[in-house]
Image (cartoon, grey):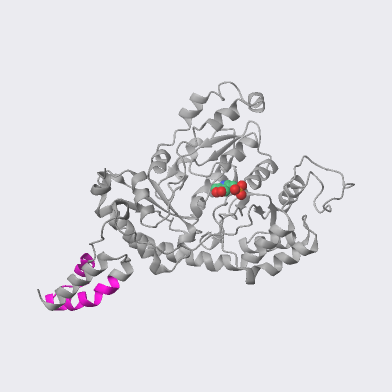
Amino acid sequence: MVKEQLTIHLNIKIMTKRNYSRREFVKQNSLAGLGTAVAMGVGPVLLANCATDTGTPAILGGQKIRTQEWPVWPQWKPEKYEEQVLKVLRSGIWSRAEVVTEFEKKWAETIGTKRCLAVVNGTNALIASLTQLNIGGGDEVIVTPYTWISSIQAVLIAGAMPVFADVDPDTYQIDPDKIEAKITPRTRAIMPVHILGLPANMEKIMPIAKKHNLLVVEDACQAWLAEINHKKVGTFGNVGCFSFQNSKHLPLGEGGAIVSDDEEFIDRCYSYHNVGFPYGALIGAVGAGSVMLGTKLRITEYQAAIGLAQLGVLDEQTTLRNKNAAYLKSQIKNIPGIKPYKLYDNVTRAAFHMFAFRYKKEEFKGLSRERFLEALDAEGIPNLSGYAPFLNKQPYLENAFQSKNFKKMYSKEELDFNTFSEKNECPENDKLCIEAVWLQQNLLLAEKSDLDDIALAIERIHKNADKIKNQK
Ligand SMILES: Cc1ncc(COP(=O)(O)O)c(C=O)c1O
């Protein structure tokens, strides 16, 4: 063995004996490898292949690749944030007042709309928006089956009928080419959801809406600061809705926002969120008199203060998530059976609420996704399998159809669940739900080099798929 080859060999032995990372592995071996490459007259491509002894998977008793903690979420920085919040707590003014108004102004400015109304959560932002666009009984709203349940529940609560258009599995978004076939004389709106923080194809969806005179309610509950051609999502349709729940990128515990350029519409939403009192009526002005049907969806001053305190880091963190997602994608996209998310060409920025890829078990010797996820977890890479299949068929729909209101608003035929299920088949979504793998956004706040551990873990599982599958 020539000297350089021996050095590589020894390094491999040393590195496989302890808990190493891909980064360390490559670093340790690259210098020695360079010498060998020169001596043997081969280039760096072969060098990369040297680094394929990925060691015994942790699920089979090997040492886990990742032992360090990942960044936590939410990230509360007392020295930076607490003064603002304490001020509100000490003031005793906790119901909606100036701080909520300031938060609304800042969010509208950040997103690029004339107005914003803060509400208790994203679910109710959607419900308020639908009802104040006068969408209700007898109307149909075109929705995507790959979303958090709230998108569909909001349509049902408004009294409208969800109509499912299948997804584009590469992007996880509603497939614009599947929308027109779903339009009927009863269709009133399209609800694109920028799911996982990846923008839906608004440049294709908006012309369809315009052509058929439909309203567009953007569910941007996972897509803070995401952009299409430098325009923020949530500003393409008639209204955009956001969530500020604890897992979200601007976490207030619970919270939501409605944004729009339509001032009258936001005034109506305001009244709706404040028991029907006219816009601008003081909170607690019992003598104001209600002017319309309304409920109560106000957020508190301390929630708004928590939001304002963290607003300053959202942009910086979004940039980091974008950079790290692109890097991680580049590191795993050539592993057979791993199909990372795709962004539409017009996307200038995503939010990356999740880093998603599809897992093709046929390229992993038939190793099931569940077992793959367990193996990934064992390596110290937390993960999720994503949404359960059949949002377009789950029992909540049948339950809504059995309700007194739905029975009054729709015919027996319309509420026949078998017919509904047949009409709302979404085969691409069924497949996507079985193949998807999510890594949560906080992983993307790690150092770029930490992401190598994810790639190494996937490579290791791929290389040992047979053994993992046959483990007794
Ligand atoms: C796509 C989507 N829509 C709506 C919501 C509802 O938001 P909230 O949880 O604030 O009610 C969420 C929250 O997870 C969501 O992800």
Residue in the foreground of this view, choosing between 438 and 155: 438
Q: Is residue 24 visible?
A: yes
Q: Is residue 199 visible?
A: no
Q: Is residue 265 left or right of residue 237?
A: right
* Residue 42: in magenta span: yes
Span colored in magenta: 26-50
Position in image of residue 138 (x %, y %): 63, 31
* Residue 234: in magenta span: no
Q: Residue at x 48, y 67 (%)?
A: 320
Q: Is residue 177 above or below residue 101?
A: above
Q: Is residue 207 above or below residue 315?
A: above
Q: Which residue, as the protein is rendered here, is positioned at the far top?
A: 412
Residue in the foreground of this view, choosing between 21 and 84: 21
Q: Residue at x 64, y 24 (%)?
A: 407
Residue in the foreground of this view, choosing between 440 and 102: 440
Magenta span: helix, strand or loop, mainly? helix
Give residue 246's quadrant in the image.
bottom right
Residue in the foreground of this view, choosing between 29 and 321: 29
Q: Which residue, as the protein is rendered here, is positioned at the far right?
A: 287
Q: Is residue 349 left or right of residue 450?
A: right
Position in image of residue 389 (x %, y %): 45, 38
Q: Is residue 257 above or below residue 1?
A: above
Quadrant of image for the N terminus:
bottom left
Quadrant of image for the C terminus:
top left
Q: Is residue 362 left or right of residue 260?
A: left
Labels in figure, total: 0
Q: Residue at x 56, y 32 (%)?
A: 396
Q: Is residue 435 above or below residue 314?
A: above
Position in image of residue 136 (x %, y %): 66, 35
